[in-house]
Image (tube, grey):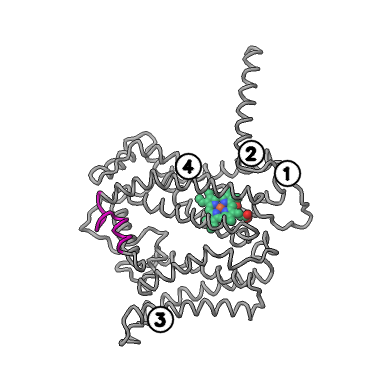
Amino acid sequence: MTQTANEQRMRDRSHLRTVANNLALHLHPPRVPAAALRFSYTWGLGGISILLVAILFCTGVLLVFRYEPSVNTAYLSIQAIETKIFFGSLIRAMHHWSANLLLVAVFLHLLRVFFTGGFKQGRGGNWAVGVALLLIVVAFNFTGYLLPWDQLAYWAITVATSLVSYVPLVGSWLQTLLLSGTQVGQATLSNFYAIHVALLPFCLLATITYHVWKIRKSGGISQPVLLAGERRDSLTTIPHLVEREMAAAAVVVAGILLWAIFTPAPLADHVDPTASPNPAKAAWYFLGIQELLLHMHPLAAMILLSLLLVMLLLLPLLERRSSDVGIYFRSAVGKRTALVGALLSINLTPLLVVVDEFWLNLPAVWPALPVWISNGFLPLLFTLAGLATIYLLIRVLLKANHSEATLGLFTFLFTSLILLTITGIYFRGPNMALTLPF
Ligand code: HEM
């Protein structure tokens, strides 16, 4: 190679490096605290979520070239992607599994921020932005679920939209709006497609940009407490942070590729509105809610869920103690409250599910009362009283402060959500009766 060609190559490389460095420095501050680089503080979950969004956008754009949002051809176009298009099956599988993984990654990221108190010290607004992101990711998965137009999609969306109808006051209006009619059909498919490929990508990109900008405005992520021997140094973002991000990204991309190669995305039979599967289940991430509806009048279940969502949103106002930010589980007492919250839930949640399934029949206990009271408001009151009791017991018996007791209570709630979802996925059989999965 001549000297001029060599020089040109070096110039191109250094130009590329400048562009890449500039991009990194738009996202990150030039220096970061050394302790915040510890992988076991963030587990890279926010970055992994961004990476998954990038994979979803790339594979999604490719799928749009061949997918047809019509009830007559949607299923056939997915079959063509699976069998006739070069790498079509792999691209669809990567899109499918990344979407599911994103839900898990975002939930785990929420737990990480919660357990390290990363929502305090002026980061409360960004916590609320995070909750909005979680809802957008759920909406993405929900609208995407219908697109293959197979039995799984049709019935999961039918069940999920019937859950929406129970939202107090605006339920049936919301259901009609979502379905664009009275049942899942062409109008629903067209709307879900438009929302999935146009509206939600815009909302997600705008909200993630704002989320990342807010982190920079708060001076980076919360500072983890220093380990023994660790110094409060700062390191340059390039290469220290970027190197770690690249390594994590390589592992995640390799993992998804391998998984997608060996596990194709599911595709059931073509839609048949007359043949409802038994059991008819919502998508897995809604099964916790579907499970709750088996135990409580829908109106009460929706009120409970709305209250819990508001509590999650307002967490930064409910829990402000800033001296424990950056410490996993706040303190030694906090570790105990979290453990007690999780253990209580692991024992209580399955016990209540089984008791309600086989023995408890509240409408029969109070036959004179309307069902929405006996099986709705009374269980709702018991649940709220139970949660208040757990909080008070943790405070008194474990001598916990408000911050540590809130940690215990929320750990109880998060564990219950996971357990209800597992029950819905594995322990509900025909007619949604409780069964063993084996
Ligand atoms: C698509 C979804 C999301 C993406 C892409 C995302 C991205 C990120 C990134 C890259 C970080 C910095 C590094 C890290 O903590 O890993 C971060 C921090 C943060 N995120 Fe998220 N996030 C998402 C969802 C959420 C959710 C659901 C919440 C909570 C409800 C949340 C609340 C926060 C907060 C408060 C911080 C600052 C934490 C601290 O300073 O310790 N985010 N996010």
The numbered mark, 4 or 1, whose residue comes first in the sequence reads: 4
Q: Amino acid at mark 3?
A: Leu
**Residue 103: where, in percent of width, then height?**
47, 54
Q: Earlier in the sequence, mark 3 or mark 1?
A: 1
Magenta range is 172-186
| Whole-number angstrom distance, CA of label 4 to CA of label 2 | 22 Å
Main secondary structure type of the part rendered in magenta: helix
Query: Element at badge 4?
Result: helix
Nearer-N-terminus badge (2/3): 2
Q: Can you tell which quarter of the image residue 159 is in?
A: bottom left
Question: Which residue was labeled with disc 4?
Answer: 55
Asked if the magenta segment contains residue 177, the reply would be yes
Question: Which quadrant would the N terminus be assigned to in this image?
Answer: top right
Q: Amino acid at mark 1?
A: Leu
Secondary structure beneath label 2: helix
Write down the residue under mark 1. 235
Residue under pointer 2: 25
Residue hosting label 3: 378
The amino acid on which the numbered mark 4 sits, given as a three-letter code, is Ile
Residue drawn where x is 63% and y is 69% of the image: 403
